[in-house]
């Protein structure tokens, strides 16, 4: 039986781009998403269903040889705060079920199933810190951050159970800062103000910012995000007990971004209407991340400056 890769949340920003990269590499993919995929690729086995359909998850693992899982199906920070019960179900319960299923599949087939989990800077808190390392104070104050931390820890524990015997789960995770794309404008997240502001400036639309001018957050571009996931998962062995890694390309304040956009687009109209829901979250997330472990273990590099980073996105 041909080995396959399972991607959940394949219609999302990360899921769709990872799927394309894996197809280019000649992989066989099963793609699971709650919504219908608009542009389908012939060779991909698409399933339109919920990650909460555990019978379906069982049947995917029972009827296929799964070698890797990329688990992107999730609810983002602001949406999670408004729907905490649903966030618990999707972000935690479903993720645990998937991790356990991948682990059992690995045990039954006497192999390690590589499992990628996209975590987030939301795991940090309760105070804003600079240059946060993976082991810095981690007491999330949001539903989303709590969900992400629970899965980081759960995945790492399941990883421990079988890894030394070479069967079970090979859990790998990256804590992403705000991700900025060239071609999509996300919503539902706290860092989404940045891609939304860039999009408004480019398209001559007014923008009302929910975060204060001096709020600093870390960011990464979509290309580097995808490359990070591919590079981390490509490693045959990852000899580290700590299974999560920080990545960042740049960090900047709302004001830094506003100034640059106003320079590039002199007609850009920006106003501020601070939202307690957004500000209270951003104030607990780090202003910058320490990426030394990612550099050491899988050669992550980031040598861009703020202005080049944004100009490159604008000019795409
Ligand atoms: C969000 O703002 O919710 C996400 C994240 C940093 O996890 N972009």
Image: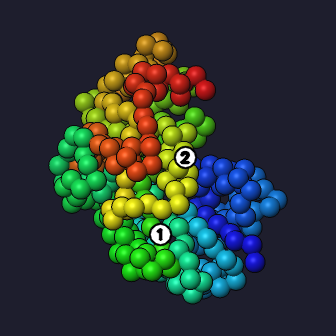
Pointer 2: what residue?
226
How many labels were placed on the picture?
2
Q: Is residue 156 left or right of residue 264?
A: left
| Residue 183 place in picture, x, y as percent | 61, 37
Say which element carries label 1: strand
Q: Can I make out residue 44 in this image?
A: yes
Q: Is residue 36 left or right of residue 226?
A: right
- Quarter of the image for residue 151 reads bottom left
Task: Say above or below: 66 vs 76.
Answer: below
Left or right of residue 4, residue 171 in this image: left
- State whether label 2 is within 8 Å of ligand 1: no
Nearest to the observer: residue 247 or residue 239: 239
Q: Nearer the viewer, residue 211 or 43?
A: 43
Q: Is residue 217 left or right of residue 98?
A: left
Query: Where's the C terminus, which quadrant?
Result: top right
Where 93 sits versus 248, above or below? below
What distance separates the C-alpha of mark 1 from that of mark 2? 19 Å
- Pointer 2: residues within 10 angstroms few (<14), some, or many (20+)? some
Mark 1: C-beta under 8 Å from nearest atom of ligand 1: no
Q: Which residue is at 62% across, 80% downward?
A: 61
Binning the other alpha carbons within 10 Å of mark 1 as few (below 14), some (14 to 19) or many (20 upward) gives many
Q: Which residue is mark 1?
A: 170
Where residue 233 is drawn, which disc sits there?
Answer: none
Can I make out residue 154 in this image? no
Residue at (34, 43) in percent of width and height: 291
Q: Nearer the viewer, residue 71 or 163?
A: 163
Q: Give the answer, above or below, for where 134 lies relative to 311.
A: below
**Label 1 vs label 2, nearer the camera:** 1
Q: According to the image, what is the colour scheme of the structure?
A: rainbow
């Amino acid at each position: 039986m041909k080995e396959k890769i399972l991607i959940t949340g394949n219609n999302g920003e990360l899921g769709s781009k990872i799927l394309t990269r894996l197809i280019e590499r000649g992989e066989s993919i099963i793609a699971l998403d709650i919504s219908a995929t608009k542009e389908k690729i012939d060779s991909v086995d698409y399933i339109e269903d919920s990650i909460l359909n555990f019978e379906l998850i069982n049947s995917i693992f029972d009827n296929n040889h799964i070698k890797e899982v990329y688990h992107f199906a999730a609810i983002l920070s602001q949406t999670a705060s408004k729907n905490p019960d649903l966030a618990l179900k999707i972000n935690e319960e479903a993720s645990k079920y998937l991790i356990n299923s991948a682990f059992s599949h690995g045990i039954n087939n006497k192999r390690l199933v590589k499992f990628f989990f996209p975590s987030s800077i939301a795991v940090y808190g309760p105070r804003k810190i600079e240059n946060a390392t993976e082991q810095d104070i981690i007491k999330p104050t949001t539903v989303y951050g709590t969900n992400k931390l629970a899965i980081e820890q759960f995945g790492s524990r399941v990883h421990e159970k079988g890894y030394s015997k070479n069967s079970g789960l090979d859990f790998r995770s990256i804590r992403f800062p705000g991700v900025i794309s060239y071609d999509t404008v996300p919503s539902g997240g706290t860092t989404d103000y940045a891609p939304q502001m860039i999009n408004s400036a480019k398209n001559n639309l007014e923008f009302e910012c929910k975060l204060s001018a001096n709020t600093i957050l870390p960011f990464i571009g979509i290309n580097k995000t995808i490359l990070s996931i591919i590079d981390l998962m490509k490693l045959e062995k990852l000899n580290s007990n700590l299974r999560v890694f920080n990545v960042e390309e740049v960090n900047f304040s709302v004001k830094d971004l506003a100034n640059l956009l106003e320079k590039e687009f002199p007609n850009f109209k920006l106003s501020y209407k601070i939202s307690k829901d957004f500000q209270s979250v951003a104030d607990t997330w780090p202003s910058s991340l320490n990426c030394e472990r990612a550099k050491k273990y899988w050669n992550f590099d980031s040598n861009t400056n703020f202005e080049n980073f944004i100009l490159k996105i604008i000019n795409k």
